[in-house]
Image (spheres, grey):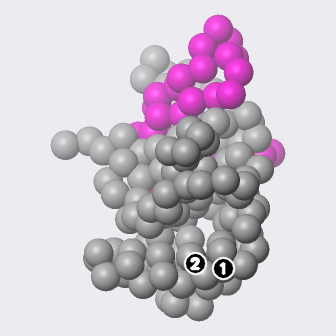
Amino acid sequence: MSQQASRVAELIEPSVTALGYELVGVEYLPQGKHSILRVYIDQADGIRVEDCQQVSRQISGVLDVEDPIAGQFSLEVSSPGTDRPLFKAEHYERFSGEKAEIRLRAPRQGQRKFTGRLAGVENDCVLLDMENGDQVDLPINDIERAHLKPEW
């Protein structure tokens, strides 16, 4: 998560949890006047459009007051979906055994993109079982983006 996204998550998490939702994570995609702040929420019964609207109204007020991001941006509140993004160590643990795609900020072993089965977290590293039988450990702080890869 970027610094701006981390700051936003810190500011809005109390409001999101007070409404009865889990704050899965926040993405900030800076693109000038077309920047996007994407907030992912979840709950046991799933997420409906009305849930996204309610959270959007609530956190818009917090963001207006705190103003953590300079300039204009569009706010999107969404369910994590089937290709659920992974943000926290707890996510990698919770979805252990699931197939995931992880992209690093900088190349490691000559590559930035890794796909395999999540095998938990150890020493601040995500363990990923690769299809060739190898296991790689990817430092959580080096992960740029990660998400589940649904198997149909």
Residue 71 as seen in the image, left or right of residue 22: right
Quadrant in which residue 46 is drawn: bottom left
- Tell me residue 65's x, y (percent): 72, 78
**Residue 120, magenta (yes or no):** yes
Question: Which label sits on residue 24?
Answer: none
Between 9 and 122, the one lying in front of the other is 9
The residue labelled by disc 2 is 59
**Is 141 rendered above or below residue 89?**
above
Q: Is residue 47 left or right of residue 143?
A: left
Q: Is residue 13 visible?
A: no
In this view, 104 is above or below 108: below
Secondary structure type for disc 1 = helix
Magenta-colored stretch includes residue 105: yes
Q: Position of residue 1 (x, y in %)?
A: 67, 48
Front residue of 113/65: it is 65
> Mark 1: which amino acid?
Val
From what the image shows, is residue 107 above or below residue 55?
above
User: Of the residues shown, which amino acid type is indicated by label 2?
Assistant: Ile
Q: Residue at x 47, y 34 (%)?
A: 101
Q: Main secondary structure of the magenta part?
A: strand
Residue at image point 39% right, 75% down? 52
| SS of the residue under disc 2 | helix
Residue 53: percent from the left, percent from the top?
A: 38, 78
What range of the chain is rendered magenta? 95-124
Residue 62's disc is 1
Marks 2/1 in contact by CB < 8 Å: the verdict is: yes
Please tell me in which quadrant of the rendered image residue 64 appears: bottom right
Say which residue appears at 73% left-offset and 68% top-offset: 67
Work out how far the residue at label 2 is from the one at label 1, CA to CA, in angstroms: 5 Å
Q: Pick the quarter of the image with the C terminus.
A: top left
Pick the residue in front: 59 or 48: 59
